Image: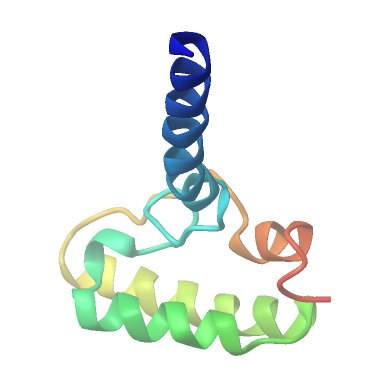
Amino acid sequence: MHRWATVILFVLLAASTIPAWAESARFQFDQDNVPGWALMTSTERAAHHQRLLSFKTLSECRAYMEVHRKKMEERAKERNRTLRTPHFDVCEQMKAQGLIE
């Protein structure tokens, strides 16, 4: 009887970690894949995030990101900062995860 209780407890604990694990596997917009992340306000980041999620194709995403990058380069120049190159291509990540075609 004690063995079954241990097994049930283990299964319940494992099941409770699934949402946390699944959340970490989801796509995230952050400083590693969004040029100018540190130059944007939290409101701008949220709007940028929503805009990226609205795209259906890789070409739409790339066109927007080109304009976004230029805007962030101008902002960085105004603040005497260097715009860091993202570690990842946000559009390619979205395509790889099936968010865009």
In the picture, measured across the screen, residue 100 lies left or right of residue 4, that is right
Q: Please tell me how many numbered marks the rendered image carries.
A: 0
Instruction: Answer above or below: position of 77 versus 44.
Output: above
In the picture, measured across the screen, residue 22 lies left or right of residue 77, that is right
Q: Position of residue 1 (x, y in %)?
A: 48, 14
Instruction: Answer above or below: position of 84 versus 11.
Output: below
Give me the residue at 22% from left, 56% from top.
81
Q: In this view of the protein, which residue sits in the foreground, 60 or 25? A: 25
Is the C terminus in the top left, top right, bottom left or bottom right quadrant? bottom right
Q: Position of residue 3 (x, y in %)?
A: 50, 10
Q: Position of residue 15 (x, y in %)?
A: 50, 40
Give me the residue at 44% from left, 39% from top.
17
The answer to which quarter of the image holds residue 26 is: bottom right
Q: Position of residue 41 (x, y in %)?
A: 19, 75
Instruction: Answer above or below: position of 52 versus 6.
Output: below
The answer to which quarter of the image holds residue 61 is: bottom right
Give me the residue at 25% from left, 72% from top.
40
Q: Which residue is most to the left?
A: 79
